[in-house]
Every structure is written in structure tokens, then in C-alpha cells.
Amino acid sequence: SPPNAGVPMTALDGRPLPQDRAYLRNSFPIPEDVEDVVDVLLPGLPQWSLSSKTLAVMEQVEIEMVLECAGNGRSLVRPAVSGLAWGLGGASPIRLGGVRLIDALGQVPDGVIELVLTGSDRGTVWPEGDVNYQFSVPIDRVKDGSSLLVTRWADEPLGMEHGGPIRFVLPGHYAMRSVKWLASIEGVGETFAGHFVNRYRY
């Protein structure tokens, strides 16, 4: 605990994997109670919310991609480094469906340079103490339509193990940016310096 599981190399033949065969990586335990509500906080606008139901009536997109943990292959690094000792099982080809984040937001006020995404999962880290999992995305990766709010895995609803009911996904980046159990989206006018943003960098 938290659950972490790699994928056998024999399962990686290029075809998208079903949810129950894809790798798992969690920094904190899976939250017990996850509401199907994502609070949206943008400066100068009233707070409002998204849900699976509101996303379902918007334009749907589908993407095939490889989701990869930033620590994939860490056990092969010499000299050895700290962290979960992945072999090469920390990656999975997948097919996801959902809504472009920019379509869900509709607008982003001037002055917002990043969105801070907060998950429902929570744990203790040093030196901050108890925190929710958070990561940020540059606003240009929102406005270009590449950031997604995912609600489906292939033809199934996105399961709890993989961050359902709503997960943020940023294709082309390591999976630590793809916040699970999404609880809130907040626009900020300065670079976000949360625990995991500072931890996952060269």
C-alpha cells in the first residue's frame, strides 16, 4: 500500500491494454470516497463545478497513447537511485476517451499561466506534512487542446484504480502530471511549486 504493479513485458505488444492489465502507480492510497465533482476556480469568475454528467454532453475525443511512469527502468540506473524500483513494467499502451480540458472550461482569464490540478488522494510527505496529490500544467498545453479530462478507458467507464470517475491526462508527458481522482482545477498567475512538482524534475 499504496498499490503499485508493473506490466509483464510479454503483455506489451503495442495494442492498447484493458484497465485490469495496465500498470498501476500511486503515491498515496486510493481514496475511499471520491465525489463525481470537480471544482473549477478561475480568478475573476464565480466558482463552478464539472461532473461526468456535464462532460458527457460535450464533444467527446478519443486518444491512443502510452502512459509511462517517470520511474520506469529506475532499477537499471547506476549508481542506484532512491524511489520505487521499477524494472521496465511501468508503461502501458492505452486508449482513453473524454473531453478536451479547454472545451470543459470554455475560457481562461488573462493572467493565468498554469492550472493546478488537485486529486482526492492524500498522504504525508516531508517536509510539508499532509497534502493532496497536486501537479500543474502550463496554460499553453490547455489552450492547444492537448490536455484532457478522461472519463472512459476504451469502451468502459474509467475505474477507480486508474483515477475515475474523472482523471486529468496530458499526453506526451510522464504520468505524474496525469492527476487521478480529480477534485479541483485552479488557475494561478505564478509558477506552482508544490511538493510533487519539485520532486519530479531533473
Image (cartoon, rainbow, N blue to C red):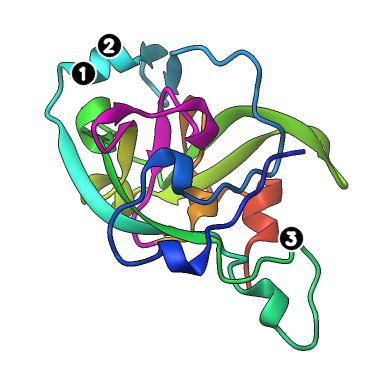
| Residue 8 shows up from this direction | yes
Q: Residues within 10 Å of mark 2 (few under 14, many from 20)?
A: few
- Residue at the spot 70% in from the left edge and 59% down from the top edge: 199
Kind of residue indicated by mark 1 = Ala
The Cα–Cα distance between marks 3 and 2, rounded to whole angstroms, is 36 Å
Question: Which residue is denoted by mark 2 in the rendering?
Answer: 53
Q: Marks 2 and 1, how far apart in space?
A: 5 Å
Q: Is residue 157 magenta?
A: yes
Tell me, yes or no, whether the two marked residues, 2 and 1, touch with CB atoms within 8 Å: yes
Q: Is residue 102 left or right of residue 202?
A: left
Q: Is residue 145 visible?
A: no
Q: Earlier in the sequence, mark 3 or mark 2?
A: 2
Residue 187 is situated, as x and y percent measured from the top left of the image, at 44, 34
Give the mark toward the camera: 3 or 2. 3
Label ID, residue 108: none
Q: Is residue 165 left or right of residue 152?
A: right
**Which of the two residues, 81 or 162, is positioned nearer the viewer here?**
162
Residue 56 — which label? 1
The residue stretch that appears in magenta: 151-172
Q: Which of marks 3 and 1 precedes in the sequence?
A: 1
Q: Amino acid at mark 2?
A: Lys
Answer whether residue 156 is magenta in the image.
Answer: yes
Identity of the residue drawn at 38% across and 13% down: 49
Disc on res. 84: 3
Mark 2 lies on a secondary structure that is helix
Q: For the residue marked with disc 3, what is the amino acid?
A: Leu
Q: Quadrant of residue 164?
A: top left
Q: Residues within 10 Å of mark 1 (few under 14, many from 20)?
A: few
> Looking at the image, which residue is at 42% across and 40% down?
19
Q: Is residue 85 left or right of residue 160?
A: right
